[in-house]
Amino acid sequence: MGLMTGKKGIVFGVANERSYAYFIAQSLVQQGAEVGFTFLPMGKMEQRVGKAVKKLGIDEPWLVSCDANDDESIQAVFDKWEADHGTLDFVVHSIAFADKDYLRPDMFHKTPRDVYKNAIDTSAYTLVAMSRSALPLMQKTDGTKTTPGGALMNMSYYGGEKVTPGYNIMGVAKSCLEHTTRYLAYELGQPDRNVRVNCISAGPFKTLAGAGVGGMDKMIEYQEWASSMKRCNTGEEVGDTAVYLLSDLSSGVTGETIHVDAGFSIVGVPPHKDE
């Protein structure tokens, strides 16, 4: 029996076996969860995601196309899930996007309006859209009574709290995502809904999306030097924290941003380089 045995949900954002979403899915599966996946309807994403998911030991994955910038596409995912599984216990939102041409130092003030809006839409508003579609499926009926409840979680980064040169509009989008988490947590936490919403702020990671951020190697190097634990966090550590936030162990936790960054975010003034 694992912490997630008997629970089922959808993970949005697996791109390959190096994505945080992959490590979250891995921990969920290890703890007994039944997990479905989505893929971006472009290029060879279906094959790429399918290949990654099979490494989790899932030979015939529930895998559905989703354009997160299209509300109808998001709703179609949840309609398909309801048809195939009935109810839903959790959703993992691990998607973000910003034009990489503006994810470089000294480029934030040059960000065009459409690039700004698209980053907020893809990285933050999509959590609202997903929660709206997920909510009706998080009401369990056994024939005599309805029991509400479920959990949503998303992924952020410290650049949403403090300036990280080169992270730029993505930092603004992550800040929006974290506050979106809090507003959703308040509204969805009401007794007749009982849905918790939390966020993990993880350290820099060479994901498919992260590779587009200018200076990613320097961000990773700096965390290894400045963090409390003198290293970067691992994908597995993020995955295990996600299990906690999606399981009943965190039944009283909502609206929180949990830092999984080896203690990087608690440091105000880092040590001198010669220390």
Image: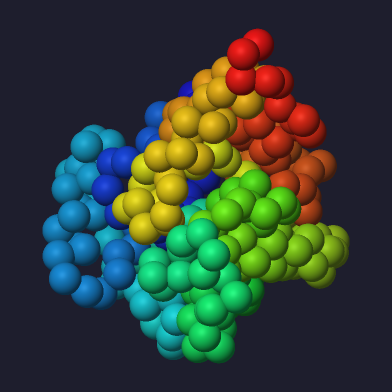
Along the line of sight, the residue nearer the viewer: 98 or 219: 219
Of 209 and 38, nearer the camera is: 209
In the displayed structure image, the side of residue 209 where residue 191 appears, left or right:
right
| Residue 252, placed above or below residue 90 | above
Visual colour scheme: rainbow
Q: Position of residue 152 (x, y in %)?
A: 61, 56
User: Where is the C terminus found, in terms of image quarters?
Assistant: top right
Q: Residue at x 20, y 63 (%)?
A: 46
> Is residue 222 something one can see in this rendering?
yes
Q: Residue at x 50, y 40 (%)?
A: 219
Pick out the residue farthest to the top: 275
Q: Is residue 35 above or below residue 138?
A: above
**What number of labels is visible?**
0
Q: Is residue 136 left or right of residue 29?
A: right
Vertical comparison of 129 with 167: above or below:
below
Q: Position of residue 82 (x, y in %)?
A: 44, 70
Q: On the image, which quarter does residue 49 sit in?
A: bottom left
Drawn side of residue 122 relative to residue 145, left or right: left
Residue 78 in sight here: no
The structure residue drawn at horizontal position 52% and vertical position 74%, both measured from the top left corner, is: 119
Q: Choose between 224 and 49: the one closer to the eye.
A: 224
Q: Is residue 249 left or right of residue 238?
A: right
Image quadrant where residue 37 sits:
bottom left
Q: Position of residue 118 (x, y in %)?
A: 50, 81
Q: Residue at position x 77%, y 30% from top?
A: 269
Q: Position of residue 181 (x, y in %)?
A: 71, 61
Observer-nearest of 180 and 223? 223
